[in-house]
Image (spheres, coloured by chain):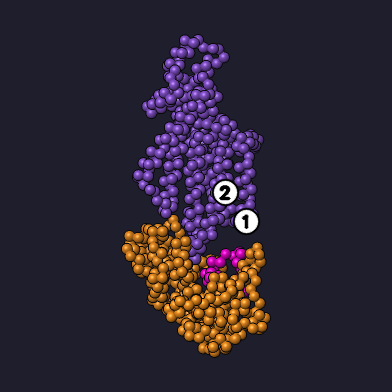
Chain colours: A orange, B purple
Amino acid sequence: MTVIDQTAGAPAPGTTTAPLLEVRDLHVEFHTRDGVAKAVNGVNYSVNAGETLAVLGESGSGKSVTAQAIMGILDMPPGRIPRGEILFQGRDMLKMSAEERRKLRGRKIAMIFQDALSSLNPVLSVGYQLGEMFRAHQGLSRKAAKAKAIELMDRVRIPAAKERVNDYPHQFSGGMRQRIMIAMALALEPDLIIADEPTTALDVTVQAQVMDLLAELQQEFTMGLILITHDLGVVADVADKIAVMYAGRIVEDAPVHEIYKRPAHPYTKGLLQSIPRLDQKGQELYAIKGLPPNLLRIPSGCAFNPRCPMAQDICRTEVPVLHTVGDRRGSACHFWKETLGE
Amino acid sequence: MGRYVIRRLLQMVPVFIGTTFLIFVMVYALGDPVAAMFGDRAPDPATAAQIRHDLYLDHSLPAQYVHYMGQIFTGDFGKAATGQPVTELMGSAFPVTIRLTLVAFAFEAVIGIGLGLLAGLRRGRFADSGVLAFTLLVVSIPTFVTAYLLQYFVGVKWGLASPAVADGAPFGDLILPGVVLAGVSLAYVARLTRTSVAENSRADYLRTAVAKGLPKRRVVTVHLLRNSLIPVVTFLGTDLGALMGGAVVTERIFNIHGVGWQLYQGILRQNPPTVVGFVTILVIVFLAANLLVDLLYAVLDPRIRYV
């Protein structure tokens, strides 16, 4: 991902150079009884058709909130978007009417949620819930929608789709349920899919199957994919580029392989070191010390400074900008050179 | 499923025997029905003994109960004080009460669920507080107060509805008593719906429904309401049983000759066959309503299995 130059004009709508989705300087805050929680503080990223962007970060880093803002499913109030633009195919979705946005949801942008059991309606059959996409968006009859639902279930390789179309979510295994979620997202062949930790609730073996399926279908339909995760292992195989988020900001973005080879931010480095490795068996696992910041009181300067092993005085006073640190790479660290050089 | 129904039906037998025996004992404790027949004058002992023998009253209480139950199952509910068979009273009372129940039930379900949905969707806002205050008011005022007030103002003073119910209980006359009878249950239905809607509107699957780009109407009716009504339907089903027998106050105030009115007369005139007969039927209605609710549960929520 490239650093967004704030002075550059918006790309003309419809030109081929414009990315599929571009988030610019997005801010999201939540008004709570205890004050204003600043969940997203100036996020920039973009995704092209057929490209996979992995958004990485701990709980509370703002990765899911950004996704919900793109989908337009934030609860507002208490949520608020004071600043920013979300350009989809060149148009700012934040300026669209509610009805316009609803029509984009499911049809152009679809989302896959983390826990398929609670994300599917327990009292409606999966066939009904899949078919609903066609009935609501394309006005298909109940019967035609069911035929489409069976087709979709076949496509995500659910065995005996025809017999299982009338089953309820609780009658499926975790992996099969997540396939149904994927099928639902794919139903109308959207241009962009946002997958919010799609494999977190699954067994490791099933995780790989589901990720492979998702990646394969993405290639087949040349969709853009935003993969939200905290699992670095998942990312390496499928992502083209990575954006690492911390306290509502992007602290590092880079093509996927560079980040594994040479992280340019101490936080990314910490994340990479905390992956368990076979050759370190028996040794104590590395953990980034401290806790993620309270979003009501984000530390001044660099939000990561209280936990950073390299923190200096400047880190406590000055918010680092996203420095260009190489070809299509950025790092929001005052000491990115040192971090890279080590 | 079939086995479940059979088991439930079998479980009803002891409940039925227990409740009917209890009411039998209580009516028996009311006093001597033969003495009641003669009023102030003491009856001739020989005549009294003859009547007692004819009415099977010279046996022990359990024996009387068994005898009575035996008669009931052949369709003989005995005779009321007026000499009319109790079955005839039932024939005239139940259709009236069923009509009243239908009117009350319609108000309760439609307005109760409507208010609850409105409040649940606008949690913490004016409409929500309004519904909560209104339902609290309705619950706290006794039925006879609302009944007399509505009868006087709406029925007599403003003449908007009929203050009393004519013979045959036409539906138009039943609007006012229907509202009164529905009142308290309506408040419960509204509050139950509100809580359920508020809870379900935070559910993950609702977020999914929005993310699918479904129209708001579809999100609310198909996804939110469908799930939120499961506990409400349970309450409504049980309440249907209660409405069938519980209208003593309302029926008296609006002069409706239904089940409640007959029961009241039966108790007032110390007439055991009427009281026990009606209560027995009401027990059966109530048990059937409960079974239906439990079976309906499985239809509404496919996760529920009967074992």
Q: In this view, does B135 lie above or below A91?
A: above
Badge 1: chain ID: B
How many circles with numbers are drawn on the protein?
2
Q: Is residue B272 left or right of residue B67?
A: right
Mark 1: secondary structure:
loop
Residue numbers of the magenta segment: A63-83
Tell me, yes or no, whether the highlighted magenta stretch contains residue B77: no
Q: Position of residue B43 (x, y in %)?
A: 51, 12
Q: In this view, does B209 lie above or below A28?
A: above
Could you confirm whether marks 2 and 1 are on the same chain? yes
Q: Can residue A217 be seen in this view?
A: no
Q: In this view, does A174 lie above or below B230?
A: below
Q: Is residue B192 above or below residue B273?
A: below
Q: Where is residue A332 in the image (x, y as percent from the top left)?
A: 58, 82
Q: In which quarter of the image is residue A249?
A: bottom right
Residue for badge 2:
B191
Q: Are marks 2 and 1 in contact (CB under 8 Å)?
A: no
Mark 2: secondary structure:
helix
Q: Which residue lies furthest to the front in this view?
A: A282
Q: In this view, does A154 lie to the left or right of A259?
A: left
Q: Position of residue B46 (x, y in %)?
A: 47, 10
Pick whichever, B228 or B98, lies toward us: B228
Tell me, yes or no, whether the highlighted magenta stretch contains residue A69: yes
Residue A54's disc number: none
Dot 2 alpha-carbon crowd within 10 angstroms: few under 14, some 14 to 19, many 20 or more: many
Q: Quadrant of residue A158?
A: bottom left
Residue for badge 1:
B124
Residue at the (47%, 63%) spot, across then down: A119
Residue at the (43%, 39%) spot, across then down: B288
* Three-letter code, disc 1: Gly
* Three-letter code, disc 2: Arg
Of the residues under marks 2 and 1, which one precedes in the sequence?
A: 1
